Each structure stands twice: as structure tokens, then as C-alpha cells.
């Protein structure tokens, strides 16, 4: 997988004159301001029956694991297994971000302190090339869709790449200093970002421009949207601020130790949203998000097993093997954590009962699978789809190119795929 086939420098097709303007401070993040003719496309794809885990490290090593779930017919339980598939130094400096494309997991992107984003074909286990657009360490990577990659960097910019020719569609400028984190709304139309300048910014991804900004009064380290897009959180040190979509502060959660990662998830059993928090306390704490916005989220469970800080968590809905047990679940959500202890853990969110609410004794949940790198300081992780339940679009084990291209063309609509770069150099 370490073989280099090509190195491609991402650059705009044109270099329009920079248009500098100051964004007014906004107390409202108007998601509705991006209304357009494009409607959010609901995914109808079958859930994967297996998964791939890729983790990066301070030691420049990239770890690849294949994950599977099988039915233990003896006691009708599920068995999760991890099998290593690759291990090699992927960058010349520490790896700070990894991301896999959704709905099939074809593309893998890795970002490093060497300022390079490397793109890999995860199915073929082959390097495609390097994106050299940023002039600072890569802090985060995210695929909003199969056909687009969004990156954040210490150079103060966010970049939107087209995942076919890997050119820059948008270069979003506005932060004064390092961008720590960004999050794309479930509609894929807008994104939030936080940085060293203590500012929260909102970006219109359809037009490639900033739409709002506000001062937080502290450095935001992680920003995340809820699954419904009706709220978001900003994490700083050991606190998490919960905001409504119109920028009203609903709650401030004070965690007992320094936080490193935050992620929303839906419940598997019952309904409602959860907030997953990984921290220095060596645990992944699960906060219940009450339906009543006046009630403060509280810890209802802890995922244990690590012996050092939890650096990152990722989730993936997964189809389960059919069981003969009455009312057996058809799917679950798996959580994957990486830690400075060098271990990769997988947890089954189905272990959290529907009646586990605020006021219950905090439930301790152990991992269902583990991989030990023997001391590597892991920094980041992503989970990609493995095989899906249906193979209607496969011929002799290969996807039809025509079907794949048509799906990607559908995703391109509304993103301004023919506008190679729309720069918006903003300050404020």
C-alpha cells in the first residue's frame, strides 16, 4: 500500500482576485440561509456487514485492520474480530488526521504535520498521491460525501477537494491562525469551524463563503453537529458548550478531566441522542441528551479498558448476522477508540439498554474487540464500510463503473463542481 503511483499538487483552475471583506458578527447561525433547489439526499444504501479501521500515530505509522462480526450459535451472541491488514510509515512526520469516504469506503485520506494530505485507494491498498495545497500541519479531514474531501489546517484555512480529479473547489479563509476543528451539517450545505483565534465560524459550502462568525471568548478545540443538525457542541479544555442551531447556549458541561474527543451518536436501543466524550481519565464517557432542553446532560455509562488518555472515537452503523433468537436486532452501532496506550478498542453500543437514563447507576461497558500496537502512541482513527448486505451493483466481485460514476455525479450537483476555487478572504 505504500507504493507511490503519482503525486498530484492540488491547485485552482483559475486564480481570481482575492475579495477581502469583514463578516459581521452574528448571534444566529442561519442554516436556513443556504436554502436552495437541492434537497438533502437520503441514503438508502444497505448497511455494511464488515468494517475497516485505519489509525494514525505520532510515530508516523499507519495501521489498517479488517473487522468482522459473526454469530456464535452456541449462545446466540455476536463475536467481533479484528485482523491486521497493513502497517507502514505513511508520512515523514506524525499523522494527525485520517478520514475514509462513506458508502463503500473507497478513499482514505491521511494528514500530517508534514503539511501533506495523502490520498489512498483503500480497496486496492494503493497510494494515489499527495495534496500539497496547505502550508501548515493538517488538523482534520472529513468526507462530507463520497465525492468531496474537506480539510482543516494550521495555516488558518479549510479546503474542499473534488474526489475525482482532486482539485480544490473551495478555499475558505477567515480564521487568524490554526483551525482546530470543523464539522459539516447533516445537510452537507454548511460547516462550522473553531480555531486558535477564539472564533466560531460558519461556512456556506454551496457558495464557498463565510456566512457568520462569533467570538467564543475561549479557544474551541472540537466542534460537532448533532445527528439531526438541530444543535452542536464546542469543546474547550474540560468543558463542552451545547448550542441550539440559532446560537443559543443551552448548557455548559464540565467534565472531570481534560477532553480530547467528542462525538454524537444515536442510541441503538430506544430513541434519543448520546454524546461520547473521550478524555484524560482513560474512559469514553456516554452522556444522555434529554429530550427536554432544560435538563442538563449527564453521564449514564462509561466504556472502559484503556490505560491512558482516549485520543479519538469514531462510530459506524453495522448490519448484524441473522439470528434465530426472537426479536433479534438487525443492526447495531460500533464505536472505535484509540488511545496513547497503543490499543484500538471496539465497543458495541447495543450494550447500552434503552432504560439506561439519568439517575441510573453508571454502567461499565467493556470492549468487544481489541488490537494492541505494542506501545505506539495512536493519535487518530477512522472506520470505513466493508462489505454490504446487497451486491446488486457488483459484477464478478467488482462494482460497475457506470453505476459508481452516476452516483458520484449526483453528489456533485449543487457543490459547484465546475468552479475550481471560490476564495473568500475574510477577517473579523
Image: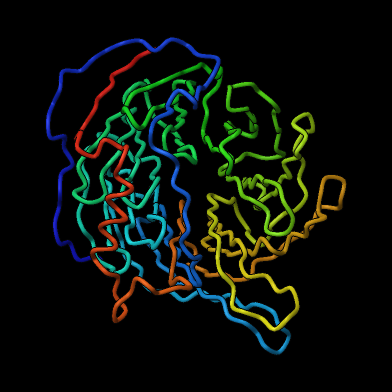
Residue at image point 38% right, 73% down: 392
Residue 327 in the image, given as x and y percentages of width and height: 74, 73
Measured along the vertical axis of the image, is residue 56 above or below residue 19? below
Measured along the vertical axis of the image, is residue 71 above or below residue 5? below
Q: Nearer the viewer, residue 26 or 131?
A: 26
For this orientation, the residue located farthest to the bottom is 74
Quarter holding the C terminus is: top left
With 141 as the anchor, is 1 left or right in this view?
left
- Rendered image coloring scheme: rainbow
Residue at image point 40% right, 48% down: 97
With 353 as the anchor, is 131 left or right in this view?
left
Residue 140 in the image, given as x and y percentages of width and height: 40, 42
Quarter holding the N terminus is: bottom left
So how many labels did they put on this image? 0
Residue 171 in the image, given as x and y percentages of width and height: 27, 30
The image quadrant of residue 202 is top left
Residue 312 in the image, given as x and y percentages of width and height: 53, 50
With 31 as the anchor, is 143 left or right in this view?
left
Measured along the vertical axis of the image, is residue 11 above or below residue 54? above
Q: Nearer the viewer, residue 377 or 2?
A: 2
With 311 as the anchor, is 110 left or right in this view?
left
Residue at image point 44% right, 33% down: 180
For this orientation, the residue located farthest to the front is 37
Amino acid at each position: 500500500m505504500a507504493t507511490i503511483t503519482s503525486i498530484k499538487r492540488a491547485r485552482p483552475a483559475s486564480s481570481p482576485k482575492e475579495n477581502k471583506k469583514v463578516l459581521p458578527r452574528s448571534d444566529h447561525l442561519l442554516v436556513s440561509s443556504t436554502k436552495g433547489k437541492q434537497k438533502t439526499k437520503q441514503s438508502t444504501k444497505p448497511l455494511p456487514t464488515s468494517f475497516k479501521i485505519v489509525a494514525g500515530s505520532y510515530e508516523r505509522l499507519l495501521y489498517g485492520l479488517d473487522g468482522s462480526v459473526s454469530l456464535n450459535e452456541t449462545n446466540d451472541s455476536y463475536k467481533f474480530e479484528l485482523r491486521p491488514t497493513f502497517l507502514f510509515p505513511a508520512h515523514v512526520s506524525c499523522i494527525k488526521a485520517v478520514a475514509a469516504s462513506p458508502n463503500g469506503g473507497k478513499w482514505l485520506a491521511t494528514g500530517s504535520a508534514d503539511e501533506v494530505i495523502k490520498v489512498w485507494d483503500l480497496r486496492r491498498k494503493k497510494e494515489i498521491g499527495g495534496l500539497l495545497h496547505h502550508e501548515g500541519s493538517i488538523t482534520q479531514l472529513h468526507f462530507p460525501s463520497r465525492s468531496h474531501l474537506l480539510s482543516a489546517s494550521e495555516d488558518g484555512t479549510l479546503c474542499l477537494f473534488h474526489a475525482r480529479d482532486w482539485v480544490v473547489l473551495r478555499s475558505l479563509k477567515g480564521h487568524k491562525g490554526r483551525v482546530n476543528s470543523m464539522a459539516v451539517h447533516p445537510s452537507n450545505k454548511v460547516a462550522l469551524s473553531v480555531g486558535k483565534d477564539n472564533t466560531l465560524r460558519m461556512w456556506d459550502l454551496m457558495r464557498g463563503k463565510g456566512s457568520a462568525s462569533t467570538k467564543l471568548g475561549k479557544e474551541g478545540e472540537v466542534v460537532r453537529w448533532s445527528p439531526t443538525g438541530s444543535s452542536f457542541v464546542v469543546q474547550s479544555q474540560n468543558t463542552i458548550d451545547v448550542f441550539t442551531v440559532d446560537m443559543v447556549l443551552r448548557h455548559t458541561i464540565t467534565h472531570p478531566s481534560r477532553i480530547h474527543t467528542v462525538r454524537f451518536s444515536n442510541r441503538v436501543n430506544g430513541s434519543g441522542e448520546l454524546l461520547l466524550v473521550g478524555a484524560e481519565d482513560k474512559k469514553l464517557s456516554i452522556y444522555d441528551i434529554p429530550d427536554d432542553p432544560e435538563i442538563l446532560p449527564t453521564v449514564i455509562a462509561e466504556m472502559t479498558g484503556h490505560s491512558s488518555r482516549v485520543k479519538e472515537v469514531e462510530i459506524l452503523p453495522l448490519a448484524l448476522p441473522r439470528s434465530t433468537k426472537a426479536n433479534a436486532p438487525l443492526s447495531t452501532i460500533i464505536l472505535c477508540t484509540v488511545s496513547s496506550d497503543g490499543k484500538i478498542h471496539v465497543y458495541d453500543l447495543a450494550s447500552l439498554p434503552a432504560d439506561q437514563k439519568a439517575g441510573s447507576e453508571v454502567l461499565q461497558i467493556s470492549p468487544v474487540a481489541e488490537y494492541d500496537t505494542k506501545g505506539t502512541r495512536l493519535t487518530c482513527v477512522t472506520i470505513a464500510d466493508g462489505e454490504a448486505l446487497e451486491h446488486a451493483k457488483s459484477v464478478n466481485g467488482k462494482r460497475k463503473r457506470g453505476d459508481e460514476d452516476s452516483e458520484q455525479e449526483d453528489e456533485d450537483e449543487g457543490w459547484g463542481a465546475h468552479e475550481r476555487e471560490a476564495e473568500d478572504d475574510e477577517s473579523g
